[in-house]
C-alpha cells in the first residue's frame, strides 16, 4: 500500500512545530467569538493576549539560546494568519509585541538581550513606538534627536499609532543619536503619557495612541548596537499574514451568507449565482497566490536570506490588496445584511484597510519595488 500520509509543504510550518499552529487555531476560534464586541468597545483585548502568552507561544518565538524554541518564521506566519482571522486587533498588537520583545532580545547586547528575553517569558508586554506624527512611513528613519544626558540620552517628542501602548511595560523606540537612527529599549514610566488620537476606522481595539515622551531617559545600556548584517524581523514578516487572515475571514463570511440567502426570483441560494461564483473563484485564487508568496517570504526569513526585505514588500502589496478585494466582494454578496453593524462583513472591510495604511504603506512598497526595477531616479 502506498503511504497516503500527506507530506508537509516545504514552505509551510515544519511538522515538529505543527502543534503550535494547532494551539493558535484553537485560540483563534475563541477570539472570533469576542472580536465584534472588542471592535465596538475599542477595549484592548488583553485577555486574548494573555491567553497567547499562557499557551507558550510568546516564549517559543525566542531563539533557543535565550530560552525559547526558535519557532520558524513559517510557523509564525501561519499563526498570525489564524489569529487575525479570529480577531485582527489581537493579532496586530501581538505582532507588534513579538516584534519589539523578540527584537530587543536579539538586537541588544547579550546581557540586556537576556533581560528582555526573561521579561517576555515572564509575560511582560512590549510595544513599538517607531512611527512619528510627521511621517509614519519613515519609521526606520526617525527625525527626532536624543540629547546627551548622564547615563545615556533624553528624548522629548511623540510617536504615533503605538499599538497596545497602554498595557506595555517596554517600548522599542528609535531616535537619532548624532544623526544616526538608533534603537533603544525604554521602560514605561512617569515621563511617558498616552494621548488619544481618536478612534480608528478599523482594528479599533488595537489600542493605538500618541505616545508622548517628556525628557525620557534612554539608558546607554539599553541602546542596541548597530546591526552586524541583515536580520529578518517579526513585524515585517507578520504584517502580510495579518491581511491574509482578514481575507480568510472575508471569504468565510461571504460563503456563510451566500449559502444561507435565497434569491426570491430564482428560489436558489445566492451561492448559485454565476457572477458570485466567478468573482469568488478569482479572489480565492488571488488569496492562494498571495499566501504562497508570503510563505516564500517566511522561508527566506528562516534562511536569513538577504532577499527577505525585498520579499516583504511584495508580500505586503499582494496580501493587503487581496484582503480589501475579498472584503469588498463579501460586502457585495452581503447586500443590505452585510451593511448592517450586526454583520461581521462591515467590520472585516474596515479591518482590511488597516494593512494598506500600516508602514510601509502599499504606495511606499510599490515605490521601493519600482526603484528595484528601474533604479532610483
Ligand atoms: C492599525 C495600525 C497599527 C499601527 N501600529 C503601529 C505600531 O505599533 N507602532 C508604530 O510605530 N506604528 C504603528 N502604526 C503606524 C503606521 O505605521 C503609520 O500609521 C503609517 O506608517 C502611516 O503613517 P502616516 O500617517 O505618517 O502616513 P504618511 O506617511 O503621511 O502617508 C500618507 C500617504 O502618502 C503616501 N506616502 C508616504 N510616503 C510615501 C513615499 N515615500 N512614496 C509614495 N507614497 C508615500 C502613503 O502611502 C499614504 O497614502 C500603525 C498603524 C495602523 C493603521
Image (tube, grey):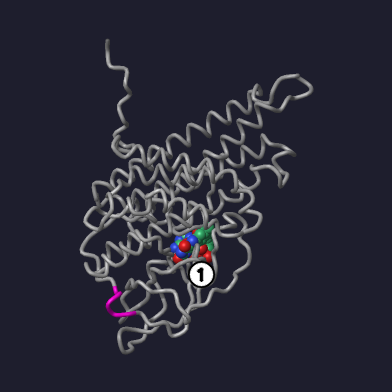
In this figure, which residue is indicated by the disc labeled 1?
160
Image quadrant in which you'd find residue 110: bottom left
Q: Secondary structure at mark 1?
A: strand
Residue drawn 22% across and 61% down?
A: 229
What is the residue that sits farthest to the bottom in this orientation?
Answer: 150
- Relative to 196, residue 157 above or below: below
Q: Dominant secondary structure of the magenta stretch?
A: helix
Query: Is label 1 within 8 A of ligand 1 (CB to nearest ligand atom)?
Result: yes
- Front residue (pair 44, 256): 44
**Does residue 61 appear to the left or right of 225 in the view shown?**
right
User: How many neighbours does mark 1 have within 10 angstroms: few (below 14), some (14-19), or many (20 or more)?
Assistant: many
Residue 377 seen in render: no
Residue at 56 percent of width and 35 percent of height: 251
| 30 part of magenta stretch | no
Q: Quadrant of the C terminus?
A: bottom left
Residue at the location (51% across, 69% down)? 160
Q: Position of residue 218 (x, y in %)?
A: 35, 79
- Where does the magenta region start and end? 219-223
Q: Nearer the viewer, residue 168 or 241?
A: 168
Q: Quadrant of residue 204?
A: bottom right
The correct choice, above or below, for 286 with respect to 217 in the image is above
Give how far across and how far down residue 80 sits, in percent. Answer: 43, 47
| Residue sticking out furthest to the top | 1
How many numbered dots are placed on residues in this image? 1
Residue 31 visible (yes or no): yes
Q: As drawn, is 291 to the left or to the right of 375?
A: right
Which quadrant would the N terminus be assigned to in this image?
Answer: top left
Residue 9 image position (x, y, % from top left): 32, 32
Q: Is residue 345 above or below residue 158?
A: above
Amino acid at each position: 500500500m502506498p503511504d497516503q500520509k500527506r507530506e508537509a509543504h516545504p514552505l509551510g510550518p515544519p511538522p515538529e512545530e505543527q502543534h503550535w499552529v494547532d494551539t493558535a487555531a484553537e485560540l483563534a476560534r475563541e477570539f472570533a467569538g469576542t472580536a465584534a464586541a472588542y471592535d465596538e468597545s475599542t477595549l484592548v483585548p488583553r485577555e486574548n493576549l494573555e491567553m497567547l502568552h499562557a499557551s507558550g507561544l510568546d516564549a517559543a518565538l525566542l531563539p533557543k539560546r535565550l530560552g525559547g524554541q526558535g519557532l520558524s518564521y513559517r510557523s509564525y506566519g501561519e499563526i498570525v494568519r489564524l489569529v487575525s482571522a479570529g480577531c485582527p486587533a489581537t493579532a496586530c498588537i501581538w505582532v507588534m509585541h513579538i516584534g519589539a520583545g523578540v527584537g530587543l532580545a536579539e538586537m541588544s547586547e547579550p546581557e540586556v538581550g537576556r533581560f528582555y528575553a526573561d521579561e517576555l517569558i515572564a509575560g511582560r508586554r512590549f510595544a513599538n513606538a517607531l512611527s512619528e506624527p510627521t511621517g509614519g512611513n519613515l519609521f526606520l528613519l526617525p527625525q527626532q534627536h536624543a540629547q546627551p544626558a548622564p547615563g545615556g540620552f533624553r528624548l522629548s517628542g511623540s510617536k504615533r499609532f503605538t499599538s497596545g501602548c497602554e498595557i506595555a511595560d517596554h517600548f522599542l523606540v528609535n531616535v537619532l543619536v548624532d544623526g544616526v537612527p538608533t534603537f533603544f529599549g525604554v521602560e514605561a514610566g512617569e515621563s511617558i503619557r498616552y494621548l488619544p488620537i481618536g478612534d480608528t476606522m478599523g482594528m479599533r481595539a488595537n489600542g493605538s495612541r500618541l505616545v508622548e515622551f517628556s525628557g525620557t531617559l534612554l539608558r546607554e545600556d539599553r541602546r542596541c548596537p548597530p546591526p552586524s548584517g541583515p536580520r529578518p524581523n517579526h513585524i515585517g514578516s507578520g504584517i502580510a499574514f495579518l491581511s491574509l487572515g482578514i481575507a480568510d475571514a472575508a471569504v468565510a463570511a461571504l460563503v456563510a451568507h451566500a449559502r444561507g440567502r435565497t434569491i426570491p426570483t430564482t428560489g436558489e441560494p445566492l451561492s448559485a449565482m454565476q457572477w458570485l461564483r466567478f468573482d469568488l473563484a478569482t479572489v480565492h485564487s488571488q488569496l492562494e497566490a498571495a499566501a504562497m508568496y508570503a510563505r516564500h517570504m517566511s522561508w527566506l526569513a528562516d534562511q536569513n536570506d538577504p532577499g527577505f526585505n525585498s520579499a516583504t514588500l511584495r508580500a505586503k502589496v499582494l496580501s493587503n490588496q487581496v484582503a480589501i478585494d475579498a472584503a469588498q466582494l463579501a460586502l457585495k454578496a452581503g447586500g443590505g445584511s452585510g451593511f448592517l453593524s450586526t454583520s461581521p462583513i462591515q467590520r472585516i472591510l474596515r479591518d482590511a484597510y488597516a494593512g494598506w495604511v500600516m508602514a510601509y504603506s502599499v504606495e511606499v512598497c510599490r515605490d521601493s519595488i519600482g526603484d528595484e526595477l528601474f533604479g532610483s531616479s
